[in-house]
Image (cartoon, helix red, strand yellow):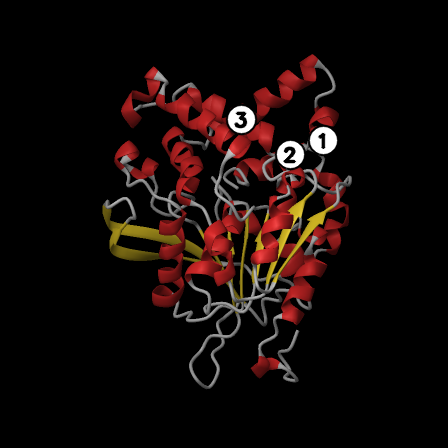
């Protein structure tokens, strides 16, 4: 995602044998070119108490909204991206090419697909726009709240057929389900856990935050050129973004390993920003859906992968906590030569059959027997 988990996850996917997954890329269906826009929220108040006079939320849409006789939008799909990424990360053959084409699970002739850039990301308002370290400190509560306003107030979407997301976007699915339990028909969190960010997951984020804040060149966020600590951030993101087998395959020798990480970091430094990534990895500080899982009413399918270093299945958290979700189900995609660790969330063919099943299982009563039934 400018990295994917992130743009970094997209780059690492490409660097680590993405050709294996995209061998059938030619068969990926065509889909409409997204329409882009911006929605500005005046005097947005963050949970920190800080206020931004104008909060810009950038978005991409595919398809058109359809309302029923009561004025309720019935075909909207929200897709949330990962930390450091943007909605642009989904406009690629292995995601949109598997989902948005004719006859595919999220056929753009039938669905209205919204892919926003969250606060601090992409073309939405972020620290690097000018406020630097004076930008309001945002969390996932702020991000979900701003996206609700984008949908409801900006795009006139008063109901969602599906809310889904990858990594950070997947984590925010759980928040959506608790804060707006009647807003959606179904939820699909990918590459996430329904618990606060702790353990190794918090520590790798702290490593990035501390590296930036303790770098003299950071200069309180007012640097004129990117501080050296941005290299440390990029290296850390590379480490957690894939699985050990792929990393070993692409870096079999000392020289190869050095070349791979040097190339990745050099590429990341062209677009990355130290303030932006520091804010982005810290945004999960307020994330803790655990206490409210019973509030989720919509059918929910959580999809993780067995080789995800960020959300390792051996923790047992997903298997345990999903039992508390009234209509919840969880699957772990087995390790294979097609999984990409944490980045498996964007390889739609790994889980699109499960998405189709979720859509069937969550078909609203008014659609049963109709021509729009999945």
Q: What residue is at 67 percent from the left and 38 percent from the top?
A: 314
In the image, taking residue 310 as reference, residue 54 lies left or right, namely left
Measured as percent of width and height from the top left, residue 146 is found at: 36, 55
Kind of element beneath mark 2: loop
Q: What residue is at 47 percent from the left and 31 percent from the top?
A: 205
Image quadrant in which you'd find residue 245: top right
Tell me which label, 2 or 3, sits earlier in the chain.
Answer: 3
Compared to 260, does 313 lie above or below?
below
The answer to whether one can see residue 187 in this image is: yes
Compared to 117, does 10 lie above or below?
above
Q: What residue is at 57 percent from the left and 20 percent from the top?
A: 262
Q: Neighbour class for label 1 at 10 Å: few (<14), some, many (≥20)?
A: some
Query: Label 3 vs label 1: CA separation?
Result: 16 Å
Q: What residue is at 64 percent from the left and 77 percent from the top?
A: 373
Residue on which disc 3 sits: 236
Residue on which disc 1 sits: 246
Kind of element beneath mark 1: helix
Q: Neighbour class for label 2 at 10 Å: few (<14), some, many (≥20)?
A: many
Measured as percent of width and height from the top left, residue 194 is found at: 53, 49
In the image, taking residue 331 as reference, residue 37 lies left or right, namely left
Q: Neighbour class for label 3 at 10 Å: few (<14), some, many (≥20)?
A: some
């Amino acid at each position: 995602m400018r990295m994917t988990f992130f743009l970094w996850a997209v780059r690492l996917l490409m660097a680590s044998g993405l050709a294996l997954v995209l061998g059938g890329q030619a068969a990926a269906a065509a889909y409409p070119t997204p329409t882009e826009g911006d929605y500005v929220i005046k005097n947005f108040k963050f949970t920190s108490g800080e206020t931004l006079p104008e909060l810009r939320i950038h978005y991409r849409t595919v398809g058109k909204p359809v309302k029923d006789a009561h004025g309720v939008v019935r075909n909207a799909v929200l897709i949330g991206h990962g930390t450091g990424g943007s909605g642009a990360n989904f406009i690629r053959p292995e995601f949109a090419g598997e989902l948005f084409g004719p006859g595919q699970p999220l056929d753009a002739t039938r669905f209205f697909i919204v892919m926003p850039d969250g606060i601090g990301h992409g073309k939405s308002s972020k620290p690097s726009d000018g406020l630097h370290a004076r930008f309001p400190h945002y969390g996932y509560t702020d991000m979900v709240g701003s996206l609700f306003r984008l949908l409801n107030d900006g795009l006139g979407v008063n109901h969602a057929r599906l809310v889904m997301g990858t990594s950070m976007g997947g984590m925010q699915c759980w928040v959506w389900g608790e804060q707006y339990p009647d807003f959606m028909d179904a939820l699909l969190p990918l590459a996430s856990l329904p618990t606060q960010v702790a353990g190794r997951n918090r520590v790798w984020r702290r490593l990035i935050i501390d590296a930036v804040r303790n770098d003299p060149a950071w200069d309180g966020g007012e640097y004129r050129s990117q501080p050296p600590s941005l290299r440390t951030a990029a290296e850390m993101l590379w480490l957690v973004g894939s699985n050990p087998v792929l990393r070993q395959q692409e870096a079999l020798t000392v020289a190869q390993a050095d070349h791979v990480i040097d190339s990745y970091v050099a590429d990341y430094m062209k677009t990355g920003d130290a303030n932006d990534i520091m804010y982005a990895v810290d945004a999960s500080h307020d994330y803790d859906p655990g206490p409210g899982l019973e509030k989720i009413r919509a059918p929910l399918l959580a999809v993780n992968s067995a080789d995800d270093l960020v959300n390792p299945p051996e923790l047992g958290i997903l298997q345990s906590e999903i039992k508390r979700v009234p209509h919840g189900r969880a699957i772990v995609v087995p390790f294979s030569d097609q999984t990409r660790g944490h980045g498996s969330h964007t390889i739609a063919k790994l889980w699109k059959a499960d998405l189709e099943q979720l859509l069937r299982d969550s078909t609203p009563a008014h659609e049963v027997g109709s021509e729009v039934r999945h």
